[in-house]
Image (spheres, grey):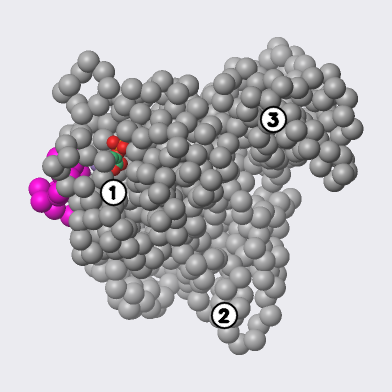
Amino acid sequence: MIVVLSKHISPHDREMIRIYLRDRGFALREQYFDDAVIIGATGKGVVDFQELRNLPGVEGVKATSKPYELASRDTKREDTIVTVGPVTIGGSRISVIAGPCAVESKTQIHETAAMVRESGAVMLRGGAYKPRTSPYAFQGLGMEGLEYMKAAGEALNMPIVTEVVSPELAVQMKDLTDMFQIGARNMQNFELLKKVGSLKKPVLLKRGPSATIEEWLLSAEYLLASGAWDVVLCERGIRTFETYTRNTLDISVIPVVKELSHLPVLVDPSHAVGIRAKVSPVALAAVAVGADGLTLEVHPRPDEALSDGPQSLYPEQFERLMRDIEAMAPVVGKELLRTPGPRYGRQTAKTQEGGLSVKSSDKVAFSGERGAYAEQALMRAFGEDTPRLSTASFRAVFDAVLEGSAMAGIMPVENSLTGSIHENYDLFLQYPDIAIVGELKLRIVHCLLGDPQAALDDIEILRSHPQGFAQCREFLDQRQWQLESYNNTATAAASIAKEKNIHIAAIAAEDAAKAFGLKVLKAGIESNPLNYTRFVIISRKIGDKAPPPPPSLGSDPPNKASLVFSVPDKPGSLFECLKVLSESGINLSKLESRPIHGQPWRYLFYADVSVPETTHIFEKILEELKTKTEDFRFLGAYRASL
Ligand code: PEP
Ligand code: MN
């Protein structure tokens, strides 16, 4: 049963409701839900609904139709994002956990941890206590193994997850692990669930090999009702008549469970298929179907593994899989979560040289309102809970970063259907203290949004950013609507919510419909589904140097740089520049010319180039390039997104 409290309830009335429910035999969990506080009352209590409804401060009472209440989406509509130390699981990120089946030795766990981290895993897995089918098989190193794993995780800034097999061990392991794993065989060990739940640590709950969805969610309910908040579900294959694969991955369970529950869902393709060569394709399928991440077995030498060698990936296979996941994630509207480093932003201001006083801020600036594509890109790059500064224009994003009211900003610079957004490129020339520190590609699915009462046939006027119109050209060519330009798509959507006119629609993201209570009249109206926008992350230079990229984008060294230059007005001058690049083995991935304002028929060249691994070689190449150009501006070096 769910009791919704009034937003203005007094502390006294709230306490009276708690006492009332506890006296009648309920266990209580309070949480915020759409700005209101709700109490989830579970257990065998009996209550007079009418009497409860009439208590001061009670807004409503809902009897849930599901046997699980705290795990149900009826109780909490928005997705739960679980945090394990610096790592998040859920939301728009794909979080990958990797490591060996079992901790075998100190060196094995350190070696594996370093390898999987290098390829992009954000958490380390490994069993210290192994529930094996045969009593004669390797049972794990126990507490000693856990100590090794904790040390490896700490050394590499990776939280660890390990299986707990008994309530007594749960207590002993509590301070050594960051997350408990309840193994498939123990999914319905209710005493274990109650004990682990009461320790209030994050839990990864595997689905039992023959558990129904309802049984699985009821096990999650045990954990939640006993006190755990951070519960992640994990599908790892179920038992069917098929014996070729170790288990059968129930791929359809992911969208089903995500609808029934707000909890994040991971997939363990290793235990699901049990055959190394089949793990990667199945892992990609899991991402495609909406999993919030994966847990995978990787071993430096699988043939020597003491358990589950045949299903453990070689480090090279894991690395390749991570690249494929990274490439695929934007197609399903997600981004691969990178190993978070030290907190970004504040340190930047503190380490400022030369006494320049730039105000420190935690915010990241974007142009537009809630629901803007730039806001989606911002959340992908920095994380959902990043404080945001919404601004009215792209220039205002530069201003905010320059004067320090934002630690960074996000700017769209190029679209796969319509090309470069020149006015944003031009801003870089006007702000020499701003550098590009990262990039991110976002898939853009445009929707036609209208008043909740509107139908497609009512529309006469259409509002959007000119890019929105351009990317939906084919859809618009079939209609005679009057077009009105706005600074960005979300502002166009917001104007419709304000005016409540059924004849006006906007081209914007589905998120904007949610943010402003609008109706999606038609989804996916972009001219081609392969519609991506490239955003760059901008930051203020410290002295002459650009600050590091947000840790969430990873700590890999830059491999791409953006430059702007003009060349003398004489034969072969551009060729001379390109020759420098070509002879140094630098790849030119983009070259574009732009008119120079105030100098008709003279042009600036915008170039994207590859960055060699050795920094001083690159600096030399740039020095040489400068001698061949007239104006030369280095916009920044950063890690290319796929
Ligand atoms: C494991 O992840 O180490 C494991 C034993 O998995 P499961 O409980 O899913 O069999
Ligand atoms: Mn295993």
Q: What element carries label 1?
A: loop
Give the crowd class for mark 1: few <14, some 14-19, many >=20 residues within 10 Å. Answer: many
Q: Which of 424 and 591 is in front in this view?
A: 424
User: In which image quadrant can residue 254 be found?
Assistant: top left
For mark 2, what is the residue? Answer: 351
In the rendered structure, find residue 25 and report the number of the disc placed on it: 3
Q: Nearer the viewer, mark 2 or mark 1?
A: 1
Q: Is mark 3 on a helix, strand or loop?
A: loop
For mark 1, what is the residue? Answer: 129
Residue for point 16% across, 37% down = 134
Residue 307 shown in magenta: yes
Q: Which of marks 2 and 3 is nearer the N terminus?
A: 3
Q: Which of marks 1 and 3 is nearer the N terminus?
A: 3
Q: What stretch is highlighted in magenta?
A: 300-312
Q: Is mark 2 on a helix, strand or loop?
A: loop
Residue for point 61% across, 87% down = 354
Residue 348 image point, x, y percent? 57, 73
Residue type indicated by callout 1: Tyr
Q: From mark 2 to mark 1, how far is it between C-alphas? A: 45 Å
In the rendered image, the vertical position of residue 251 relative to residue 596, given as above or below: above
